[in-house]
Image (tube, rainbow, N blue to C red):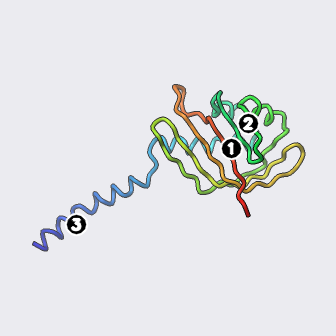
Amino acid sequence: MKRALLRLALLCMPLLMASAQEDKLPNQGEATVLRLEQRWEDALTKSDTEALAELYDDTLIYTHSNGKVDTKQTYLRTIKSGATRYESMKREDIKVTMYDKTAVVTCHWEVHLLAGGNKTDLDARYLHVYIQRKEGWKLVAHESTRVAH
């Protein structure tokens, strides 16, 4: 009896391990959103307004850590004019949670930017909300909050 149970356990081990590994891998939606997040960082640090326009939904609400709120049009205009320039950013603790055709991303980021001629170093967390449209995933909301020290 003990040998039979041992054999059964050994036979089931690979299945359990494979199942556990699948739980750790991002699903297709999560993987897509993570790629979009990287495209967003790349576009922002290069001031690539064409790439940002592709990522942003027309209904975008972009809330900055200082409380200022932009639309897609006003934010892209600010980036294009050079009034705000993201010099670099470091992102970590990126988590994607899927809800059917909606994805919520949370992240810690350190940002170095020039805004209105003033250098700003920001330590914050952000929340991104993506929705799946016919033409693909689009960012509909950005909210950033400074980390208290």
* 102 horizontally vs 79: left or right: left
Q: Quadrant of residue 57?
A: top right
* 25 horizontally vs 93: left or right: left
* 145 horizontally vs 20: left or right: right
Quadrant for the N terminus in the image:
bottom left
Residue, x 67% and y 44% (percent of image)?
143
Q: Earlier in the sequence, mark 3 or mark 2?
A: 3
Tell me the SS state at disc 1.
Answer: helix
Determine which of the numbered discs, if any, sits on residue 10 in the image: 3
Q: Which residue is mark 2?
A: 48
Q: Which residue is mark 1?
A: 42
Q: Nearer the viewer, residue 86 or 121?
A: 121
Q: State the residue lying farthest toward the right.
A: 117
Residue, x 77% and y 47% (percent of image)?
66
Whole-percent x, y for residue 109 in the image = 68, 54
Residue, x 84% and y 44% (percent of image)?
115
How far is the residue under mark 2 from the one under mark 1?
8 Å
